[in-house]
Amino acid sequence: FEHLFIRKTCLMDTGLYSSTGSTDAQQKLASFWSTVNDEINNVQDFKTQELPLARIKKIMKMDEEVKMISAEAPVLFAKAAEIFINELSLRAWIHTEDNKTKDTPAE
């Protein structure tokens, strides 16, 4: 999961990852990667996933070049997809919150 830290560093360098946000969503985004890192370091059972492993394995097998899939690969793909979905949802929430304040007429 070293690539997760590289991604976080890239986001910090580009200004997309900021801990100075004032909304709840921005604060959650600021702590997102440290929370993900803590969860990964404290995982006891890798077989328990939010996404169905059989479906992920089926999608992986759709590629004609894939002959065999190790037992760990669908688990890692499931965790990566879960992290991606969580971050994307959080960023969508921030975008919605930002636009809500811009669209609200001043009183």
Image: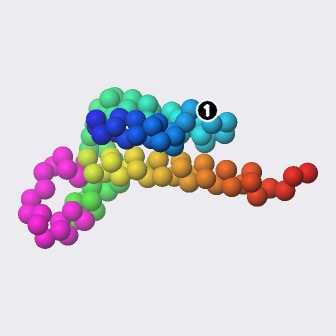
Query: Is 100 displayed left or right of 88 in the figure?
Result: right
Q: Quadrant of residue 96?
A: bottom right
Under mark 1, the amino acid is Thr
Query: Is 70 displayed left or right of 14 in the figure?
Result: left
- Residue 84 in the image: x percent, y percent? 40, 50
Q: Quadrant of residue 2?
A: top left
Residue 68 on the magenta span? yes
Specify the farthest residue to the front. 14
- The residue positioned 20% from the left and 70% from the top of the image is 62
Q: Quadrant of residue 38?
A: top left
Query: Is 37 displayed left or right of 90 in the figure?
Result: left
Residue 45 vs residue 64, the one in the foreground: 64
Specify the farthest residue to the right. 107
Residue 11 vs residue 75, the one in the foreground: 11
Q: Which residues are magenta?
A: 59-75
Q: How many circles with numbers are drawn on the protein?
A: 1
